[in-house]
Image (cartoon, helix red, strand yellow):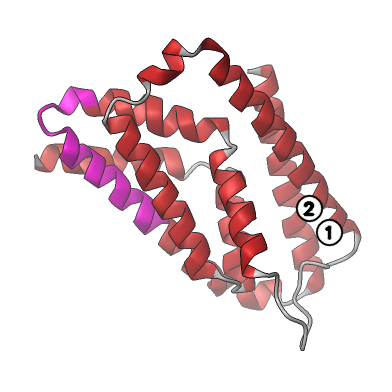
Amino acid sequence: MIEALVAGYLVSISLIAAIGAQNAFVLRQGIRREHVGWVVLVCAVSDAALISAGVAGFGAVSQSVPWLGDAMLWAGVMFLLVYGALRFRAAWQGGGALVPAGRAPVALRRVIATCLVLTWANPHVYLDTLVLIGAISAQYAPHGLAFGFGAVAASVSFFTALGYGARLLAPVMARPRSWVVLEVIVGATMWAIAAALVFG
């Protein structure tokens, strides 16, 4: 059981740690110190639900519905392109991502909505959680539950560290030019992911 638990943690953390749209958003919110707890919660709960479904064998659904994979792929590509364009526009405006003194931060509902879309509209998250983690967990039967628990624990610990650890970069990100660089990196990451999805 301990072996399955550790394996679940290591497999999950290796998949989540890759730079992606979701991680870039969590990092950005952490640096801005805006609704970090909610962002971490949404990401962790979403991952927990998907990992649980994968361990339970829900990944077989994608095989029985042939068009589902393509639909998720192109929906994800379109969203990544649009979100990347918005980040480039923010960079062009010159540090517009900063929250000026006396100005209210972005509304919580908008932050949660963006976080949900970045999580659930990303085809990679289904491949990682429903298919890969689900398939690997089967190798640890009858301790699949322990494997799944380890995978969920990895998700919770990673997003918590990313969201709250990002504030250590706050002194650097106090300069508007640093935000311009961050927005360009995030935008380029979004478009690179979209290109990778389209061209395999």
Q: Residue at x 54, y 73 (%)?
A: 168
Quarter of image, res 178: bottom right
Q: Nearer the viewer, residue 105 or 10?
A: 105
Tally the marks: 2
Q: Amino acid at mark 1?
A: Ala
Q: Is residue 155 above or below residue 175?
A: above
Marks 2 and 1, how far apart at CA = 5 Å
Percent across and percent down for residue 94 are 88, 65
Quarter of image, res 137: top left
Q: Secondary structure at mark 1?
A: helix
Q: Amino acid at mark 2?
A: Arg
Tell me the number on the disc at residue 87.
2
Percent across and percent down for residue 27 are 58, 60
Q: Main secondary structure of the magenta part?
A: helix
Q: Residue at x 77, y 75 (%)?
A: 175
Q: Is residue 121 above or below residue 183?
A: above
Quadrant in which the C terminus appears: top right
Tell me the number on the disc at residue 38.
none
In the image, residue 107 lies in the stretch drawn in magenta? no
Residue 19 visible? The answer is: no
Q: Residue at x 80, y 72 (%)?
A: 176
Residue 174 visible? The answer is: yes
In the image, residue 153 lies in the stretch drawn in magenta? yes
Instruction: Tell me: 149 left or right of 39.
Output: left
- Label 2: few (<14), some or many (≥20) within 10 Å? many
Instruction: Tell me: 6 left or right of 90.
Output: left
Q: Which residue is mark 1?
A: 90
State if disc 1 and disc 2 touch (CB < 8 Å).
yes
Percent across and percent down for residue 125 are 49, 35
Quadrant in which the N terminus appears: top left
Highlighted magenta segment, given as a residue range: 138-158
